[in-house]
Image: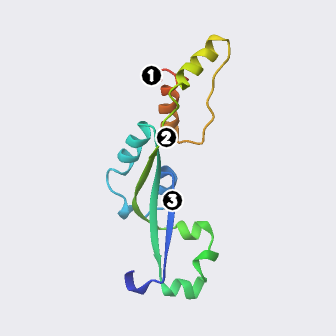
């Protein structure tokens, strides 16, 4: 740890949200291009970041576990991405087509990032490839 820092704060979250808290000098030039490319391919992407906590900060502000989320996240350094692939069921597009043919309107509700959700919606024919 740099200069004997007793703690390191680790943070994870969406690349879009975490980018706002990161030290700009720690971000690679291709940060947006990389996470966007993975999301467009249907991956769930998390950004990872960290920051060392100095002895002085602990003495002044107390143990980091007692800090507010905003205090912990401020000025973190980019550490990398982690991406997960979650395959859709093989029969999903068949089920969606059958539902449409029977007069049902199909929609998707998800907590995924917009580009990931669009990729999945295209795979299961909830929207067209051109959308």
**x%, y% of residue 54?**
47, 83
Image position of 23 with respect to 29: above or below:
below
3D distance between C-alphas at marks 3 and 1: 31 Å
Residue that sits furthest to the front in the current view: 90
3D distance between C-alphas at marks 3 and 2: 19 Å
**x%, y% of residue 71?**
57, 70
Q: What element carries label 3?
A: strand
Query: In front: 62, or 110?
Result: 110
Image position of 59 with respect to 84: above or below:
below
Q: Which mark is residue 12?
A: 3
Q: Could you tell me which residue is drawn at 50 percent across and 32 percent down?
A: 120
Horizontal relation, residue 4 to residue 95: left or right: left
Q: Callout 2: 10 Å neighbours few (<14), some, many (20+)?
A: few
Q: Name the residue under label 2.
A: 86
Q: Which mark is residue 10?
A: none
Q: Callout 1: 10 Å neighbours few (<14), some, many (20+)?
A: few
Q: Residue 129 carries which label?
A: 1
């Amino acid at each position: 740890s740099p200069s004997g820092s007793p703690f390191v704060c680790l943070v994870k979250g969406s690349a879009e949200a975490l980018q706002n808290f990161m030290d700009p000098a720690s971000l690679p030039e291709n940060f947006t291009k990389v996470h966007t490319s993975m999301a467009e391919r249907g991956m769930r992407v998390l950004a990872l970041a960290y920051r060392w906590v100095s002895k002085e900060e602990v003495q002044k502000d107390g143990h980091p576990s007692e800090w507010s989320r905003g205090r912990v996240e401020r000025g973190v350094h980019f550490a990398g991405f982690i991406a997960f692939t979650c395959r859709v069921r093989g029969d999903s597009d068949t089920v969606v087509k059958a539902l449409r043919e029977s007069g049902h309107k199909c929609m998707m509700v998800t907590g995924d990032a917009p580009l990931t959700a669009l990729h999945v919606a295209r795979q299961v024919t909830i929207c067209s490839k051109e959308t």
